[in-house]
Amino acid sequence: MGDASRRFFVLGLMIFLLGGLVAYQQARVSTGQRPVILKVPGLLEPRVLEEPHLERYYRYCGHREPIPLPAGVKWNWADKEEMNLLFPPAEGWRITREEEHLVIIQEVDALCPADAPRRHLAVKDGLVAIYQGPAGSLGPLMRVTNLKVASLPPSWREKIENDQAEFNSEQEVLEALDSLDEFRP
């Protein structure tokens, strides 16, 4: 029996060494490739460990501002599924990674609070129009006046056509339009 035990021991040792050699060779051949990780659903799902940065992106002006966690939401190391429930893409939420930080952005069709009170003049169908937001923004059309751009003095016409007729408030726009009343047809 001693001879048989020794044979099994030597055979087992050879299989072990051969397995180690195969593993070493496989590791050398597949350098640069990412390992394949098998994932069993429900077991050890990857979780976000750091608290994300929340931001709101205003499409009309292109500005971003930090926002607090929505009311009732507690940060508890959520996984991807929980993140999609907390921040649904249908409500404009987008989850990205920027500079090693998790960033959750809500995109809204609006101007940021700083740009919302601003106004600018632009041309619409040959008439002077008032738009909400700074010049060059995609803010909504407030109203179209009955002032023809062609009847304005060259300095005002250039300002309006070159997106330079910008005002900080509705009141400033009304004062500027009052000064242009003499050019109404």
Image (cartoon, rainbow, N blue to C red):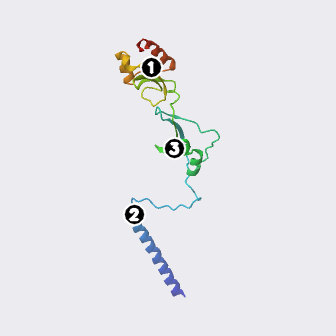
Q: 161 above or below 98?
A: above
Outermost residue, front direction?
185
In whole angstroms, how far apart are the C-alphas of marks 3 and 2?
35 Å
First reached walking from the N terminus: tag 3 or tag 2: 2
Q: 107 above or below 13?
A: above
Q: Which mark is residue 94?
A: 3
Circle 1 packing at 10 Å, graded few (<14), some (14-19), many (20+), is: few
- Tag 2 residue: 30
- Tag 1 residue: 146
Q: Quadrant of the C terminus?
A: top left
**In this figure, what is the number of numbered marks?**
3
Observer-side mark, 2 or 1, equals 1
In percent of width and height, residue 62 lies at: 46, 34
Residue type for callout 1: Asn
In percent of width and height, residue 84 lies at: 56, 48
Q: Are marks 3 and 2 in contact (CB under 8 Å)?
A: no
- What residue do we see at 51% from left, 82% from top? 8
Outermost residue, right direction?
72
Front-most of residues 55 and 85:
85
Answer with left or right where residue 88 lies relative to residue 167.
right
